Image (cartoon, rainbow, N blue to C red):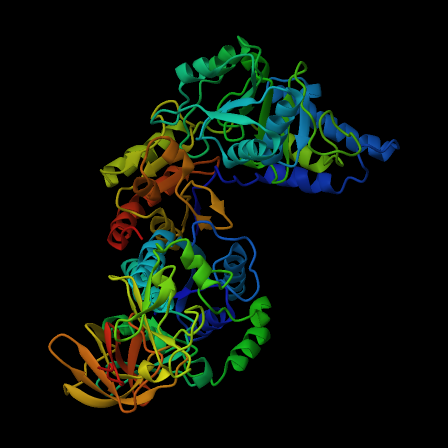
């Protein structure tokens, strides 16, 4: 197969590219230029898009003896990932930019370009597995390396995208093994730190980064009955589940800490309440996709995962006329609109929805 | 079998130059040493200086060897600017090579320079009326390409120098892509300084020269042993010798007929391809096009896969592509500029190579168009 290996300059995508070569594919390495003004050198463990990273990727491609190119996706990335991230926060939602990048850049803009240019597949260093069922249909599954599993951020992939995706690291039991393999292959980047956080916020200060980009208007902090408890400097700076930074100045009647339950951008209100009220009994989203063949019944048992590093919990999923509605068996904390709920059955990713609304497990007091 | 159509990036050394270079590398002795071996090395270097200076229409004493075109350009621009203090104004265009633009922007940021960017027309040629209007005795220098390295347009160097001379303003001419392709006559031009590079004419990478008129002063960038008029650093006798051997082989074959075959063939094969740069007053080996709806990255990849080495023509910062500042300066919009591809011919180029490209191009363009603009 003609395989385009997306090479970030990190150890995972380097080993993934090497394995694609070993598997006998005709591999071309591509580094995506995602920033218009890339930094020269990597700083700390953050970021993936410096010139040093592109040089690391180029060096590995050279050692593998494969052609290597840098393709400019900076405009698409700015519009589809960065601007979307800001817009989602402005709308009081909590987005996952890595998911948007997979959905719109790596397995859309890049994959479309690769297919048009004659490639059969795009290979990445994601930890996830693709399993082909008896009928030849492709399924997305968790990686063997449970601790590194990235099937969550790939949950947005559709059957069509999976047809052309390749994850050579899926069966590897641990990251340590990938690092060891990189070292054995003589890659200098074998000990490069893992990238984490959001690549376009190099210092990791998401709040500070957002402050300059999201409009901030002072507004009321209210409880669930609508009583005003204080004021805030801008609703978009708050995330559901947040406890710090409310500065209400006086304690709740029961003396317990208050948490952000909801952010209402239209009225510029931040709703706070007791921890118990964070529990969510129902999650629903109108933007949902299936990672493979859609489920055969309109209601089924599953597990739901609502963050990249959250544990999956048992739930029932139902497809209604407009929504995917997920009901956790036990009420679930830490759910915010904008997040993605990925639905699993065992190790298999069934699909996902972007969460539009939630229903609290604790009724609003009269 | 790769077909090399990127001679403007660098052109291969001929076997003759390669042999001269390798044998010169075995000559023992620092040209600045006083002993006989040093003198022998010096002799080789000074012979080279005379050969190259003569080819440029300059005196040997006016030629300072450098590490390449970028250093020559930096030395000319910064050196003339400092020597012309307290004048702060510099006139140039946005279609210059990055070596010029970045040097000028550095002078703005760190040395108080005020750079005035004279507009260029749709072919990338400087607006002489605007230049004339901007000139006065407060201008420290004017710096201009002799031939644009991307789109190939020749600049009216003599007119530029004439206009500047009326105000006593020195002109630096970046002749890096012109030398070897079109006549360069330093004395005849009246320029104050002129930059060239060996590897663009079949010499080695890492060797260049700045011609500095007898009457001009440049402040050095590199301080040390004062081995040359405006530069310190051990003299590279072998590099200079190889540069001279490549210079002595000039002029190379006339590439205009082959270039016109290429241009006509591209237009026939891809009717909406747009030839950039002046169709007539351009470098003999340069054919530069934009292909609407295509991404140059895609075209380059497809042609590379098919065995053709070509260029998008624009600057790459460690391989990160950006839209050509030259095309933007010429008024091409960012999307149009993304579809740029530059084919440059050299002494090895043949009709068969050009025809092979023309056979491969329509398929590549069709495929790149399907891939669209990222």
Q: Is residue A342 left or right of residue A196?
A: left
Q: Is residue B248 visible?
A: no
Residue at x 52% of width, y 39% of height = B11
Residue B286 in the image, given as x and y percentages of width and height: 41, 33
> In terms of depth relative to the viewer, which is nearer, B287 or B277?
B277
Residue found farthest to the right? B35
Say if A252 sits above or below A38 in the image. below
> For residue B123, which quarter of the picture?
top left
Residue at x 45% of width, y 80% of height = A148
How many numbered marks have been drawn onto this rendered protein structure? 0
Residue B374 in the image, given as x and y percentages of width and height: 31, 53
Residue at x 39% of width, y 22% of height = B281
Say if B365 sits above or below B216 in the image. below
Q: Is residue A220 visible?
A: yes
Residue found farthest to the left? A321
Q: Is residue B150 left or right of residue B250?
A: left
> In terms of depth relative to the viewer, which is nearer, B230 or A334?
A334
> In terms of depth relative to the viewer, which is nearer, B298 or B137?
B137
Say if B295 sits above or below B230 in the image. below
Residue B249 in the image, given as x and y percentages of width and height: 57, 29
Q: Quadrant of the N terminus of chain A?
A: bottom left
> In terms of depth relative to the viewer, which is nearer, A254 or B304?
A254
Residue B336 in the image, given as x and y percentages of width and height: 30, 40
């Amino acid at each position: 197969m003609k395989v385009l290996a997306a090479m970030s300059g990190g150890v995972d995508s380097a080993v993934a590219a090497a394995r694609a070569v070993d598997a006998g594919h005709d591999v071309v390495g591509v580094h995506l230029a995602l920033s218009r003004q890339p930094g020269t050198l990597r700083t700390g463990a953050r970021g993936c898009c410096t010139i040093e990273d592109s040089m690391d990727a180029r060096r590995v491609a050279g050692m593998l003896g494969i052609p290597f190119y840098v393709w400019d996706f900076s405009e698409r990335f700015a519009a589809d990932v960065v601007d979307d991230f800001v817009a989602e926060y402005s709308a009081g939602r909590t987005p996952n930019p890595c998911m948007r990048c997979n959905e719109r850049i790596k397995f859309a803009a890049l994959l479309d370009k690769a297919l048009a240019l004659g490639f059969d597949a795009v290979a990445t260093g994601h930890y996830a597995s693709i399993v082909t069922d008896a009928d030849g249909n492709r399924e997305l599954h968790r990686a063997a390396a449970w601790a590194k599993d990235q099937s969550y951020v790939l949950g947005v992939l559709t059957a069509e995208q999976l047809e052309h995706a390749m994850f050579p690291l899926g069966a590897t039991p641990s990251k340590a093994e990938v690092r060891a393999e990189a070292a054995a292959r003589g890659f200098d980047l074998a000990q490069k730190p893992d990238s984490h956080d959001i690549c376009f916020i190099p210092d990791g200060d998401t709040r500070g980064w957002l402050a300059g980009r999201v409009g901030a208007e002072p507004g009321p902090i209210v409880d669930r009955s609508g009583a005003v408890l204080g004021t805030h400097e801008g609703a978009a700076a708050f995330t559901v589940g947040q406890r710090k930074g409310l500065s209400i100045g006086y304690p709740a009647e029961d003396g317990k800490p208050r948490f952000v339950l909801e952010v209402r951008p239209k009225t510029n209100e931040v709703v706070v309440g007791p921890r118990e009220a964070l529990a969510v009994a129902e999650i629903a989203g109108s933007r949902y996709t299936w990672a493979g063949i859609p489920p055969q019944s309109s209601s089924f048992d599953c597990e739901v995962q609502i963050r990249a590093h959250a544990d999956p919990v048992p739930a029932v999923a139902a497809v209604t006329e407009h929504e995917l509605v997920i009901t956790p068996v036990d009420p679930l904390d830490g759910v915010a609109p904008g997040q993605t709920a990925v639905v699993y059955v065992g190790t298999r990713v069934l699909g996902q929805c972007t969460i539009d609304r939630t229903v609290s497990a604790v009724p609003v007091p009269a | 079998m790769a077909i090399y159509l990127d001679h403007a990036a660098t052109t291969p050394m001929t076997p003759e130059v390669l042999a001269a270079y390798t044998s010169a590398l075995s000559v023992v002795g620092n040209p600045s040493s006083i002993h006989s071996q040093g003198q022998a090395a010096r002799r080789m270097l000074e012979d080279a200086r005379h050969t190259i200076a003569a080819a440029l229409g300059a005196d040997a004493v006016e030629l300072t060897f450098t590490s390449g075109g970028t250093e020559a350009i930096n030395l000319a621009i910064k050196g003339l600017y400092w020597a012309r203090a307290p004048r702060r104004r510099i006139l140039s265009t946005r279609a210059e090579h990055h070596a010029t633009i970045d040097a000028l922007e550095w002078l703005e940021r760190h040395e108080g320079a005020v750079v005035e960017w004279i507009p260029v027309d749709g072919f990338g040629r400087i607006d002489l009326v605007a230049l004339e209007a901007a000139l006065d005795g407060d201008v420290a220098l004017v710096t201009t390409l002799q031939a644009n390295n991307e789109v190939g347009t020749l600049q009216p160097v003599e007119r530029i120098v004439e206009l500047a001379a009326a105000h006593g303003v020195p002109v630096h001419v970046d002749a890096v892509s012109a030398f070897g392709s079109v006549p360069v006559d330093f004395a005849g031009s009246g320029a104050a300084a002129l930059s060239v590079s060996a590897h663009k004419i079949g010499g080695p990478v890492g060797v260049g020269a700045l011609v500095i008129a007898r009457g001009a002063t440049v402040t050095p960038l590199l301080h040390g042993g004062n081995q040359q008029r405006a530069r310190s650093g051990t003299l590279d006798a072998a590099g200079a010798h190889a540069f001279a051997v490549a210079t002595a082989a000039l002029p190379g074959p006339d590439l205009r007929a082959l270039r016109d075959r290429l241009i006509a063939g591209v237009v026939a094969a891809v009717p909406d391809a747009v030839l950039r740069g002046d169709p007539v007053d351009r470098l003999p080996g340069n054919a530069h096009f934009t292909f609407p709806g295509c991404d140059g990255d895609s075209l380059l990849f497809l042609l590379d896969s098919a065995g053709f080495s070509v260029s998008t023509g624009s600057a790459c910062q460690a391989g990160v592509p950006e839209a050509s500042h030259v095309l933007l300066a010429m008024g091409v919009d960012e999307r149009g500029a993304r579809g740029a591809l530059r084919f440059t011919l050299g002494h090895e180029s043949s009709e068969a190579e050009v025809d092979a490209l023309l056979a491969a191009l329509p398929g590549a363009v069709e495929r790149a168009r399907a891939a669209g603009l990222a």
